[in-house]
Image (spheres, rainbow, N blue to C red):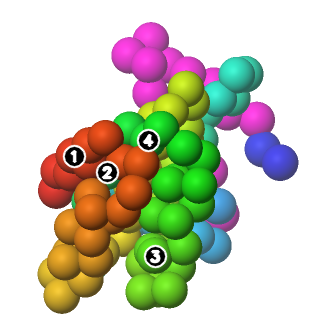
Amino acid sequence: MKLARIDSKGRISIPSAMRNYLGIEKGDSFIVASGKKNIKLVPMSSNGNVEIEMEFTSINALASAINLLAKNKIKIVSSNSSAGRWHAVLDVQKSERKIIKKISSLRNINYVRTRNL
């Protein structure tokens, strides 16, 4: 674990040994997610990321959506859920985008919205 400080512009430096180990390069993009008392940086995929938001009326609907993604080997890069909503970023090849459309046809799903990142 390394100690890092935030500068006056709100920037934080990732130590070079950590960047080298993780293959992080200048210009790489990250998802910045906050937890209760932490910040999570998730590297974006070069394949193509899709942000998905869905509202469901049954926890089984969320489980069905996640199972559909898993069956089709679609990687969930980042996700969170609360009060009948699920928000995630998926690593999706263009050929796999039709799978996301299938999620909206599952039972107990009120809506699904997506956007390319």
> Hey, which quadrant is residue 36 in on the image?
top right
> Which one is nearer the viewer's eye here, 92 or 29?
92
Q: Nearer the viewer, mark 2 or mark 4?
A: 4
Quote the CA–CA distance across marks 4 and 3: 15 Å
Q: Nearer the viewer, mark 1 or mark 4?
A: 4
* Residue wearing tag 4: 56
What amino acid is at disc 1?
Answer: Arg
Residue 26 makes an appearance in the image: no
Q: Is residue 29 found left or right of 64 in the rendered image?
A: left
Q: On the rendered image, what quadrant is the C terminus found in?
A: bottom left
Sooner in the amino-acid sequence: mark 3 or mark 1:
3
* Residue wearing tag 1: 113
> Helix, strand, or loop for circle 4?
strand
What amino acid is at disc 2?
Answer: Ile
Measuring 52% from the left and 65% from the top, which residue is drawn there?
64
Quote the CA–CA distance across marks 2 and 1: 6 Å
Quote the CA–CA distance across marks 3 and 1: 17 Å
The stretch in magenta equals 3-17
* Residue wearing tag 2: 52
* Residue wearing tag 3: 68
Sooner in the amino-acid sequence: mark 2 or mark 3:
2
> Which one is nearer the viewer's eye here, 85 or 105?
105
